[in-house]
Image (cartoon, rainbow, N blue to C red):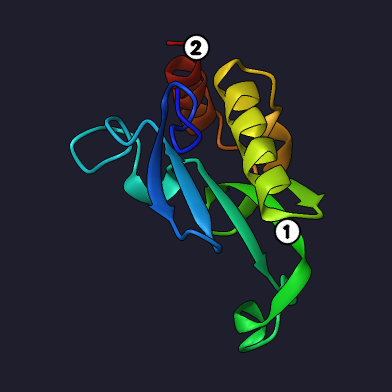
Amino acid sequence: MTDSDPPAGWSLWNDEPHGRRILVFRPDVFNEGNDLPAECIPTILVSNRSRARRPGASQIPTDTWHVVLTLEPDVEAVVEEYESRDAAVEGADDLARRFADGDVDYRAAYQLPREDYLDRLDDVVES
């Protein structure tokens, strides 16, 4: 595995040399042809952009790098902080491995139960 290769089960979607890095989990099953919708693809974003929830804030760079695992557009399962992009990329790869190994409690991220979807996600993670 090279520095730019994501862990097994994950695909590199975007990798800006000194900026964002985006990993997606099993794009082969999260698509319109399957029962797992594309908008629910587990995604890990590495970024140093502000996480403030106000218009334009996401365009402002910060000194802190964030690694965020989302399960849907508004469902964040894990948020971690790092002091450098290199450390954040390593952290993202570690998070990706933990997720693929079933060591991330993604069910806890949901306020409303989605048992059928989460059972199906369990099947994909365990395969």
Q: Amino acid at mark 2?
A: Glu
Q: Are marks 1 and 2 in contact (CB under 8 Å)?
A: no
Q: Is residue 7 left or right of residue 67?
A: left
Which residue is the site of mark 1?
Answer: 65
Against 99, residue 41 (above or below) is: below
Residue 77, image x and y in percent?
68, 43
Q: Residue furthest top?
A: 127
Q: Residues within 10 Å of mark 1 (few under 14, many from 20)?
A: many
Q: What numbered label is drawn on residue 111?
A: none
Q: Disc 1 residue type? A: Trp
Q: Secondary structure at mark 2?
A: helix
Closer to the camera: disc 1 or disc 2?
1
**Real-space CA distance between mark 1 and mark 2, rounded to the nearest whole angstrom:** 30 Å
Image quadrant occupied by the C terminus: top left
Q: Is residue 119 above or below residue 90?
A: above
Residue depicted at 75% across the width and 73% down the height: 62
Is tag 1's residue or tag 2's residue first in the polypeptide sequence? 1
Local SS, label 1: strand
Q: Residue at x 43, y 42 (%)?
A: 41
Residue 109 or residue 62, whichever sits in front? 62
Image coordinates for residue 39, horizontal then vertical, percent: 39, 51
Q: Position of residue 100 (x, y in %)?
A: 55, 21
Q: Is residue 113 visible?
A: yes
Q: Residues within 10 Å of mark 2 (few under 14, many from 20)?
A: few
In front of the other: 34 or 112: 34
Residue picked out by circle 2? 126
Q: Quadrant of the N terminus?
A: top left
